[in-house]
Image (spheres, rainbow, N blue to C red):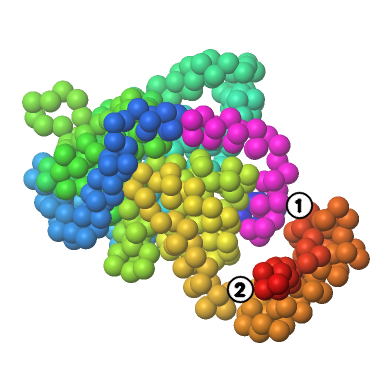
Amino acid sequence: MTTQTLSFYNRVDDALRDGSLRTALDRATSRFIGNRAAALAALAGPDALRDQARAIRAYALAHLDELLNQLSDNVEAHGGRVCWAEDGAAARRYITDLARERGVKSIVKSKSMASEEIHLNTALEQAGIEVIETDLGEYIIQLANETPSHIIAPAIHKTREQVSALFTQHLGEPPTDDVPAMTRAARRALRQRFLRADMGISGVNFGVADSGAVTVVENEGNARLATTVPRIHVAIMGIERIVRSFEDLGVMLQVLARSATGQKLSVYTSIISGPARPNESDGPEEFHLVLLDNGRSQILGGKYAETLMCIRCGACLNICPVYQAIGGHAYGGVYSGPIGAVLTPLLQPDLPEQHTLPFASSLCGACQEACPVRIAIPDLLLRLRADAVQQGKAPPIERLAMEGYRVLMTNPALYRASGKLGGIASRMFGRKRRFRQMPPPLHLWTRKRDFPAFPAETFTERWEKRRKSDER
């Protein structure tokens, strides 16, 4: 049985039992969290910078139609072509048809969550075109026939030992736990792929409206090769990933790198404006920008519009106690973690059990605190939970429990009586002030933790005693 055929709760159980997954997540997320904290602390005014970044994103969403048209006009003025893709099918069709018309046999890709969102690789491979991921993490999971489990670190769920085993199996490399040695092996395997490729596909971190440029941020240099060596470059950009100017871009790059990996600036920041000019020796002959809607325009202007402020830094995943425990694959969709629990129901509404994802949160607020643009993720999760209940998607036993809770909390006499009964039960059955086992449905709680016993004396009783004592 594959992961996708399992229920959400079964995927969570499998993740919790996976010791290697826990080891990999602990190694990576703790490093990301520490680096981010140090990078922000080094700034003179980190809060002011985040406020500025939020204002930039809010402006872009409020003027999205204007900025997108400006970006499109400027891309075409630089010799590029623009595809307005209403959904994933339109984007796949445009890129696949382009590849066929140009006789493309091999494609190299840099990391692109938008391409994952529309399942582009599958469509290209079904058309008989070879597709090679060149980001190291993406390359690893392609060898493993898996999907990304993190927005910026696709193979975060893999330990170095597992990566070594993959390289031994697919590349014939000797087993090693030396990370630089494994990196060199991947570089040797990929180098010729860049030279043979007819097309390079990249994502877009930000489009710059007033210049017609797209920005690609990375740390490995593979995206720079994928966008310059092949004769055709296709960039896929979610329509919300836009800024007004280079001044705005400068602010966003500062918060992106610090929030994602704790760097002051990513190693490579490529700003691309169309194909190579006649007097330029490097660059593609053709540049195509795919502006992907895929449900985003339906979110814009509604109660979930704030979700579109996300800059895909991954900070909320790293800090989230739920993500740290179960990783990304348990979520079942392209996007995972707190922001994924919001994005997936909105962008992939047909995904089985997508309505359960907003419940995979403790609502501790750490995600909002870590977000560089202060997205109120807990509020969005609560709204999605309410939507699920209103649509009748809550389990029957949960609906019954909440109705019972409502009756209890709106009836003072019943509330006081239940407190007394709880105290009596605690004295009769509780040991050391806690229950190790409870009957269904509370057995799901005690399967992982003890259930606290009710106090022998309720708050109401204690307050009444205090009142009488004060009157004497």
Determine if residue 128 is in view.
no
Residue 204, quarter of the rendered image = top left
- In this rendering, the answer to whether 431 lies above or below 414 is above
Foreground: 335 or 106?
Answer: 335
Q: Which residue is mark 1?
A: 448
Numbered disc 1: secondary structure:
loop
Q: Which span is picked out in magenta? A: 7-34
Along the viewing direction, whichever of 71 and 169 lies nearer the viewer: 71
Q: Classify residue 261 by image quadrant.
A: top left
Residue 53, horizontal then vertical, whole percent:
27, 45
**Residue positioned 59% across, 36% down in the render:** 25
Overall secondary structure of the magenta stretch? helix
Numbered label attached to residue 438: none
**Within 10 Å of the Cα at label 1, are there few (<14), some (14-19), or many (20+) other Cα atoms?**
few
Residue at the image point whose x is 54% and y is 53% from the top: 364
- Residue 22, given in percent of the width and then of the height, sits at 65, 37
* The label number, if any, that marks residue 394 in the structure image: 2
Residue at disc 2, secondary structure:
loop
